[in-house]
Every structure is written in structure tokens, then in C-alpha cells.
């Protein structure tokens, strides 16, 4: 197993690059006298962020909770659906066009319909939007994982006279786990994005989405970016937790880029 | 290469318009014919929303040739949810913008240099409506209810009204309202935000499931922020402050623009059906009866004028708007602005000149005898 | 356990095993395998194959690509079924033998499950056959010691070199102490030195356990070093061309020194000539050409 590259390369270099980029940005804003409502400086964003930390925190909790619920629902349904599609190939054939269509339309377009169905004052519609956006990558990737089986493993199971259930438990399911995590990693960011954008179409006030647009509507872009920063952090947290989960479940391998 | 070409063309237009305006001003104050050089000055107006009768005066001025009479070739740009008109103006992509005062005050504090040169809407059209059986007649009644607001800077009158009545944002369930009344009609929102000229009519154009007929005003309670004392100034014409100060041609153009726009609004007052038709022809997708309702309701916000003539910025009303902008907190504890706006935030100089010219021409700029018409709404606004 | 008691220097013609009371480990009779292809050009992978392997006997299958040696192995393992003929393993049908787990198998790819530790990989067949935890642990410790990987019990496959992975695979194939081992070029991916070492190990293990082995290989020295008999096969259609007895002494005696013995080279020559199409006449003369 490849050891991770040395500390300087994996951590210091990207951090330095980030700091450099931010410094250039600050320089540009000051030197070119860019007005705050055109492009705020990193310093003003940081100031707004620190003065609104509690508000960013509570907003992140709202959006994050919706994203988490959506992630859980979408992932569980996606995994179950993939298992069903593997066991009953007919269901896969029937649903394939639907899933293909769903994967290209922006799920968020369904938000207004969902608010009408589930109540414009509830969080439900946003959670469903996130769940739908999560379902697709989890389903497709898990399905792929369940389908791929190395011939040598298949031969081995047959040679051992293993029942199909035994073969599934011993080989198919664990072999599908890396693929599942590929899907989950994509889904974790999608969950946050979808939950946030879903806020624009209804539901209780309190999430990051509303905060961003309210600030932007008064041209207070520093504040808007402060909330955007909160959203970025939220997305990162989800991503890192998913990575950590994968490390926990599969300590034997580097985080999946492939089988 | 394209850049230098643009510069030359822009320079040529500037030179020509300078000549034209020089020709205009030298020939007297009530010039209503083309300038000596025969060129029209291109002018761009950025609206706050999609084409609708909320902007009837500008469309009417365009249609009736009032802008042309002033030597202006006006292009009207529609707005949308993601367009911030004052930013379009500040960015130089429009010459004038229509926007609400509290939204722009925020932009000005962020460094935008723009000036309110004509306060077209004297009164606010924002209301909070609810079904009769909820018994929500004042701001205090909102406590414990599901209250809808669009956000995007439209929420300050609501928050000011609640703050004044001692209702905290924690005392209500604040709901993000979509730009339709479906949530309200479905009962998910108890008290919904509604403009008198638009969303209120949308409800009256819907069928009341209880009666099988369209909703009537008797089915609804309306909280009017004008009555509650927390109304803020809305649609105004905004111009670039720096150009007003430095560019005489722009300053003169502003007076002309205001004058022609006012004539358009007067036309809308006297000919609401035609004005509604003009807006529909300009591309509005709203139904006929809805458009007429909107024209009529907007007229009520303007006429009769109590500030000395349409477009005059009333000191007391401005102060109220600024006080609310500084003192009202939203659900995150933020206010619109944290300090007094600069003196350049509004100016009556240009509208006064325009009104004087119109009065000299014998035009009634106060509309004291204005009476609204009766509009019958049809299902779906058709 | 020793093979048939042939005197040194004498190869038994055609390598027929001495009849014994126990059933043959493997009995292949008139087996043919045809792979039908969509385009209609069928491939005859095997044709009229007859082979009998005695218990405890080490037999290699060698031949060029396409000669059907891997196919034959798979048929014995019941990973595939013959188009004609029959196969018996320890007197049962191949299918029954598979169900009864009469053999252990190792492929060219180690085929270790990457999410299991080395120990868990070895225990895999035991787990599938419901062996208790304590028993499994005891057996896997034994096997780890046997292949010399006791220190790596808790490592994961991708922390091991190719040779070590193969050793794990071999340990796994021995997990249930089968009477028959089926191996398809298990050392194919290893370098020469590791290979030789593994061959020595394998011989030692087989001597200790007394298992019969069917060993597919490309390498003549390997076949000679390991086997009691070498089955030379030829392609198109796949069939047995020759069976060469390799009498280099009892399994326990096959150590490193054997690789430099004259008898070793002579056997290698015999196999090579057979592979290159020389007639199979008078193998005895060849085998004993020393003086």
C-alpha cells in the first residue's frame, strides 16, 4: 500500500498555495480599488465572518441538518435499490431510463413541486431534494460495485461450494464497498448543495441560502460571502466525515479512486 | 481592436449628445422637439422585476413617444430574482434603475454611489394578508403564526412592524415564501407577504374551495404597513451620483428622463386600460384583468400626490425609511444600514426642475382629482 | 507418502500407477471439451483425454498455449463441465467432489480478498464450511507456520509482495487438508529465485501432507523438479501427447541440490524433446542415458 506522500507535499504545499491566492486577492482589491459591492476583499469577508459567527453557525446547522437527513435517506434507498436491481435484473431494466433521465435534470427543479406536495412551511421538501440528489450517485455506483466481480473470486467461491448467499456475503458485498464510497463522496457534497439551493423555493427561514440572498440583495457582499464561506466549510465537513467513515470501514486501503 | 472601436463610437455618441443637449438647452426650457443634430441619446433603464404594470409609466412613456420628445432613445431592461438593479446601475450597465429605497440604502453603504432622483411611488404596497378565520388584523396578532416573506430585501417593513408591536422573530415561524401564493392557498402559510398590486390579486383570482367561487376581499384580512406606521419608500428612479455631479449632460438628461417618465405615469393615471395594454404588448405574461388591476393599484400608490408632485421625495417619509433601515433587526440580528446615508443618497433638484417644466406646460402633477377605477378580476387573471 | 516404488533409473512406461486398493485421486476418461463460439467456429479445447492420478502423486501438466491444460484443471475442479467423457475424483463425480470439498485449489492470481487480513483469507474456506472460530484460528496458525508467514497474520494483502500473496493462497488451499491439490501456474507471476524457493516449499508441504497434486505449468524445470510424472500436452485440438515419468527419488529427497543433478537435466531434456514434437518412442532409453 502506497504510503501517503510526505507531510510537506500533502499539507504544506496546498495551504501555501491557498494563502498565496488569498493574499493576491486582497492585493488586487486594494490596489485596483475595487468597490465592495463588486468584489469584497478577503479581509472584509473575514471580518464579517467573525462578527456573524453565531449566525453562520445556526444557519449551517439548519442547512446541515437537512443535508444530513437527505444524505441518509438517499444513501439507504440507493443501496437497497442497487441490491434489488442486482438480484432482480428486470427491475434494473425497467428503471434504467428513469434513472438516466433523473441523473441529467437538475433535481432542484423539483423543489417547487415538492413544496406544494409537502407543505411550503416544512423542511421536508428540501430534505427530499437532497435525498434525490444523493440517491442517484449512490445507486449507480453501488450497482456498479455489486456487478463487478473478479473471475478468480467467482471461481474460488464455486470451488468452495459456497451458496450464493455465502458468495454474496464473502465477496460481492465487501467488493462493492469501495464503489459505494465513491458514490457517497460525490453525494455528500451534493447533499449540502441541494439542501441549500432548495431553501430558495420555500420552507422555514434559517438556513444558509436565505442568509446569502438577503445579504446580497442589500449589496452586502462581504456578508454574503461570509455565509458562502460557512457553506463551503459545511460541504467540507460532510466530505471529510465521509472520508473518515471510509477509512474506518476499510482500513486496509487508501480512499477509493477505483477498485 | 473591438475595444478601440467601442471607444470611438462611444466618444462619437458623447460628442453628438453633448452637441444635442447644448442645442436643446440653448433653445429654451420647454424643448420638446428633436435636438438640432437630430440624434437621440441612448438611455438604458433597469427595472426591478419582470415587465408588468408596476412599471406602466415607463412603458407608456416609451410607447407614447415621451422619451423621444425629450431626445432620448430608451431601452428598458427587465429585472428578475437574481438581478440587483442598483448594482447594474453602479456597474455602468444602465443609466437609471428602479429599486426600493431600503434595498439601495444597503448598497450605498457598501460603496455604491447612486442617488434617488424621483420617488415615483409615494406609498408602500407591501401588505401581510391572511384568511379571515386566522384573525390576524395587526402586527401583534402575528405571534405564534406561520409568517411568509420573500426575503431578498423585501422583508424589512414586516420586521419593523413586528418589532414595533413587540413581536420577536422567535415568536413566529418564519417561512421562505416562493414567488407565488400556492403555499398561502394551501394553508402552509398563515400570513403571507403580498403586494397590493400583484399577489393580493393572485389570491382574488383563485377559487375558494369552500365556496367554489373566487376569493373576495371579505375572505381576507390585510395588514397595511402604511397604516401600521412602518412603511418604507419603494419604487424610485435612481441615477449615478458621480455622473450627476461631474457630467452636466447626464444631469440634464436626468431631468428629461424624469419628465418623460412622469408624463408616462400621468398617461397611466388617465388611461389605465391603454397603459395595461401597452405593458402586455411589451411582453408581460400576466393576464389582462390582472394587468389592469396592477395598473390601477399602482396608480393608487402615486395619486393623489401629497409631497408636492409625483416624484418629490418627502423628507418625513425618507426619514422614516432611514430610521427603520437603521433600527430594524432581521432574524439574524442584522440591520439594513448601520449609519446615516450620505447627503447624495437623494436629491429633489432634478425632479423639481422636471415638475416645474411640466407645470409650466399646464400639466397636473398632483392628481388631486384622481379616482381609481373598478377592476373585475377573473380566474387566473385573464 | 511415496509414489509407486520404481527403481531408480527405470522409468515405468507410460507412467501407469501401480494399482492400489484406494480409488485414484483423479480419473479422467475420454474427456473432450468444445467451446462453442457465436460465429460458429467451435474451439476444441480438449479431445479424448485419458489420465489417472494416484493418491499422493504429483503430476504436472505442461504444454504450449491453447493445449488445454488449464481447461483440464478446471474440468477436474468442476469449474466447468466436459462435453464428452467423465471425470472422477476419489471415486466420486467431479461435481460431488467439489461439493464435498475433496480438493484445494490455487490459481495464478492469488485471488486474496483485499479486505481480509492474511489470517482471515486463509480461514475463508473454513469459515464457509462453518468451522468454529477456535478451530479456525488454530488451523490458520498452523498453516501460517507452514508457509513461513506467521509474522504477517494481521497484515492485509496489499501489504505483501506477490510471492508472499501466493504463499497465502497456497496456505489457503491447504486449509482443509485436502487429498488433492489443483494448481494453475501458481508461481507464474514470480521471479525465478522466489519461484525456486516456492517450489522447494511446495514439495516439502506435499510430502508432509501426502496430497495428490495436479500442477499446471509453463516451465519445464519446474515440472521436472516437482513431479512424479509430467503430462505433455499439445494444442489444436488439445490432447495429451506424452506422459513422462520423472523418477528423481522420493519427494523428501528433492532439495536444492537436485537442480544440479544430471538426472534432473536428463528429465528436462526428455520433457523438452517431447514438447518439441519428438515421438514418444523409447522413453526408457532416454531416461537412463547416463553413462
Image (cartoon, rainbow, N blue to C red):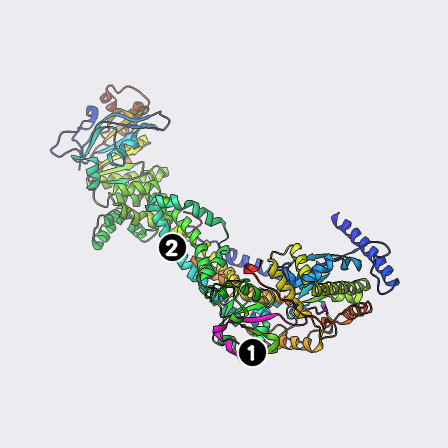
Q: Would you say B307 lies left or right of A48 here?
A: right
Is disc 1 surrounded by few (<14), some (14 to 19) or many (20+) residues within 10 Å? Answer: some
Label 2 resides on the chain identified as: A
The image quarter containing residue A131 is: bottom left
At 25% from the left and 45% from the top, the residue drawn is A163
Stretch in magenta: B115-141
Question: In the image, residue B222 lies at what x, y percent?
Answer: 55, 73
- How many numbered callouts? 2
Q: Viewer-proximal residue, C9 or A75? A: A75
For numbered disc 1, what is the local secondary structure? Answer: helix
Q: Quadrant of residue A222?
A: bottom right
Question: Which of the image's four quarters has the C terminus of chain C?
Answer: top left
Q: Badge 1 is on which residue?
A: B163
Evaluate whether residue A231 shows in this view. yes
Residue C52 belongs to the span the image colors magenta: no
Mark 2–mark 1 distance (CA, rounded to whole Å) = 45 Å
Is B133 covered by the magenta stretch? yes
Which residue in the rendered view is the most extreme toward the right?
Answer: B26
Left or right for B61, reference A183: right
Please determine whether, in this image, residue A109 is positioned above or below residue C186. below
In the rendering, which numbered label is found on residue A35?
Answer: none
Instruction: Count neighbours of disc 2 (C-alpha within 10 A) and say few if under 14, some if 14 to 19, many if 20 or more.
Output: some
Q: Which residue is mark 2?
A: A77
Q: Vertically, is A6 above or below C194?
A: below
Dot 1: chain letter: B
Find residue A62 and report its horizontal and vertical position in percent.
47, 67
Whole-percent x, y for residue B158 in the image = 57, 73
Amino acid at each position: 500500500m502506497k504510503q501517503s506522500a510526505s507531510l510537506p507535499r500533502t499539507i504544506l504545499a496546498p495551504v501555501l498555495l491557498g494563502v498565496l491566492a488569498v493574499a493576491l486577492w486582497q492585493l488586487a482589491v486594494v490596489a485596483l480599488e475595487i468597490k465592495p459591492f463588486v468584489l469584497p476583499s478577503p479581509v472584509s469577508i473575514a471580518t464579517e465572518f467573525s462578527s456573524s459567527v453565531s449566525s453562520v453557525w445556526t444557519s449551517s446547522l439548519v442547512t446541515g441538518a437537512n443535508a444530513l437527513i437527505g444524505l441518509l435517506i438517499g444513501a439507504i434507498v440507493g443501496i437497497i435499490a442497487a441490491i434489488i436491481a442486482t438480484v432482480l435484473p428486470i427491475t434494473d431494466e425497467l428503471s434504467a431510463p428513469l434513472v438516466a433521465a433523473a441523473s441529467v435534470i437538475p433535481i432542484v427543479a423539483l423543489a417547487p413541486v415538492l413544496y406544494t406536495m409537502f407543505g411550503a412551511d416544512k423542511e421536508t421538501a428540501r430534505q427530499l431534494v437532497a435525498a434525490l440528489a444523493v440517491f442517484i450517485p449512490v445507486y449507480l455506483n453501488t450497482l456498479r460495485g455489486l456487478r463487478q466481480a473478479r473471475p478468480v473470486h467467482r471461481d474460488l467461491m464455486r470451488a468452495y461450494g459456497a451458496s450464493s448467499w455465502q458468495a454474496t456475503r464473502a465477496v460481492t458485498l465487501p467488493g462493492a464497498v469501495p464503489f459505494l464510497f465513491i458514490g457517497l463522496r460525490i453525494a455528500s457534497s451534493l447533499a449540502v448543495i441541494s439542501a441549500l439551493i432548495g431553501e430558495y423555493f420555500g420552507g422555514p427561514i434559517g438556513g444558509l441560502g436565505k442568509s446569502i440572498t438577503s445579504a446580497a440583495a442589500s449589496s452586502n457582499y462581504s456578508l454574503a460571502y461570509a455565509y458562502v464561506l460557512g457553506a463551503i466549510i459545511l460541504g467540507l465537513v460532510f466530505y471529510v466525515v465521509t472520508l473518515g467513515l471510509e477509512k474506518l470501514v476499510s482500513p486496509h486501503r487508501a480512499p477509493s479512486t477505483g477498485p | 481592436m473591438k475595444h478601440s472601436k467601442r471607444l470611438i463610437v462611444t466618444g462619437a455618441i458623447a460628442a453628438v449628445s453633448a452637441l444635442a443637449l447644448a442645442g436643446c438647452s440653448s433653445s429654451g426650457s420647454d424643448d420638446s422637439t428633436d435636438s438640432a443634430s437630430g440624434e437621440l441619446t441612448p438611455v438604458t433603464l433597469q427595472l426591478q422585476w419582470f415587465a408588468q404594470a408596476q412599471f406602466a409609466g415607463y412603458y407608456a412613456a416609451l410607447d407614447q413617444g415621451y422619451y423621444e420628445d425629450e431626445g432620448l432613445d430608451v431601452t428598458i431592461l427587465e429585472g428578475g430574482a437574481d438581478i440587483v438593479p442598483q448594482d447594474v446601475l453602479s456597474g455602468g450597465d444602465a443609466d437609471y434603475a428602479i429599486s426600493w429605497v431600503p434595498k439601495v440604502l444597503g448598497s450605498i453603504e457598501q460603496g455604491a454611489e447612486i442617488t434617488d432622483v424621483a420617488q415615483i411611488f409615494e406609498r408602500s404596497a407591501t401588505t401581510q394578508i391572511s384568511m379571515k378565520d386566522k384573525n390576524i388584523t395587526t402586527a401583534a396578532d402575528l405571534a405564534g403564526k406561520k409568517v411568509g416573506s420573500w426575503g431578498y430585501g423585501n422583508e424589512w417593513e414586516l420586521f419593523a412592524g413586528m418589532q414595533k408591536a413587540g413581536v420577536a422573530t422567535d415568536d413566529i415561524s418564519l417561512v421562505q415564501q416562493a414567488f407565488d401564493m400556492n403555499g398561502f392557498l394551501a394553508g402552509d402559510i398563515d400570513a403571507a407577504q403580498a403586494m397590493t398590486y400583484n399577489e393580493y390579486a393572485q389570491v382574488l383570482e383563485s377559487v375558494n374551495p369552500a365556496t367554489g367561487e373566487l376569493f373576495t376581499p371579505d375572505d381576507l384580512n390585510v395588514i397595511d404597513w402604511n397604516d401600521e406606521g412602518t412603511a418604507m419608500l419603494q419604487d424610485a428612479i435612481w441615477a449615478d451620483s458621480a455622473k450627476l455631479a461631474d457630467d452636466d449632460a447626464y444631469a440634464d438628461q436626468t431631468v428629461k428622463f424624469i419628465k418623460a417618465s412622469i408624463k408616462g405615469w400621468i398617461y397611466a393615471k388617465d388611461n389605465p386600460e391603454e397603459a395595461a395594454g401597452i405593458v402586455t404588448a411589451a411582453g408581460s405574461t400576466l393576464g389582462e384583468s390582472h394587468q389592469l388591476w396592477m395598473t390601477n393599484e399602482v396608480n393608487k400608490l402615486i395619486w393623489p400626490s401629497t409631497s408636492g408632485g409625483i416624484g418629490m421625495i418627502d423628507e418625513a417619509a425618507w426619514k422614516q425609511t432611514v430610521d427603520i433601515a437603521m433600527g430594524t433587526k432581521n432574524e439574524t440580528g442584522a440591520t439594513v444600514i448601520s449609519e446615516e446615508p450620505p447627503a447624495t443618497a437623494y436629491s429633489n433638484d432634478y425632479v423639481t426642475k422636471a415638475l416645474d417644466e411640466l407645470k409650466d406646460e399646464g400639466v397636473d402633477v398632483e392628481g388631486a382629482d384622481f379616482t381609481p377605477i373598478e377592476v373585475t378580476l377573473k380566474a387566473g387573471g385573464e | 507418502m511415496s509414489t509407486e516404488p520404481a527403481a531408480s533409473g527405470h522409468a515405468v512406461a507410460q507412467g501407469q500407477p501401480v494399482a492400489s486398493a484406494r480409488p485414484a485421486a483423479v480419473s479422467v476418461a475420454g474427456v473432450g471439451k468444445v467451446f462453442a463460439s457465436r460465429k460458429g467456429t467451435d474451439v476444441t479445447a480438449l479431445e479424448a483425454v485419458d489420465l489417472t492420478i494416484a493418491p499422493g502423486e504429483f503430476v504436472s501438466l505442461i504444454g504450449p498455449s491453447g493445449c488445454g491444460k488449464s481447461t483440464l484443471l478446471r474440468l477436474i475442479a468442476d469449474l466447468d463441465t466436459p462435453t464428452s467423457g467423465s471425470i472422477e475424483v476419489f471415486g466420486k463425480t467431479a461435481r460431488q467432489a467439489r461439493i464435498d470439498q475433496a480438493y484445494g485449489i490455487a490459481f495464478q492470481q492469488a485471488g486474496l480478498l483485499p479486505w481480509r487480513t492474511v489470517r482471515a483469507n486463509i480461514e475463508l474456506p473454513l469459515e464457509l464450511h462453518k468451522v468454529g472460530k477456535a478451530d479456525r484460528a488454530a488451523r490458520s496458525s498452523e498453516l501460517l507456520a507452514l508457509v513461513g508467514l506467521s509474522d504477517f497474520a494481521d497484515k492485509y494483502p496489499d501489504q505483501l509482495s506477490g510471492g508472499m500473496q501466493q504463499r497465502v493462497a497456497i496456505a489457503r488451499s491447504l486449509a482443509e487438508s485436502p487429498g488433492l491439490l489443483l494448481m494453475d501456474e501458481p508461481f507464474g507471476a514470480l521471479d525465478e529465485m522466489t519461484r525456486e524457493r516456492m517450489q522447494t516449499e511446495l514439495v516439502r508441504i506435499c510430502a508432509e501432507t501426502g496430497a495428490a497434486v495436479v500442477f499446471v505449468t509453463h516451465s519445464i524445470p519446474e515440472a521436472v523438479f516437482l513431479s512424479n510424472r509430467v503430462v505433455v500436452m499439445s494444442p489444436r485440438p488439445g490432447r495429451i501427447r506424452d506422459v513422462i515419468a520423472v523418477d528423481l527419488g522420493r519427494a523428501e529427497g528433492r532439495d536444492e541440490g537436485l537442480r544440479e543433478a544430471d538426472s534432473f537435466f536428463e528429465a528436462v531434456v526428455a520433457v523438452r524433446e517431447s514438447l518439441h514434437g519428438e515421438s514418444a518412442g523409447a522413453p526408457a532409453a532416454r531416461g537412463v542415458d547416463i553413462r
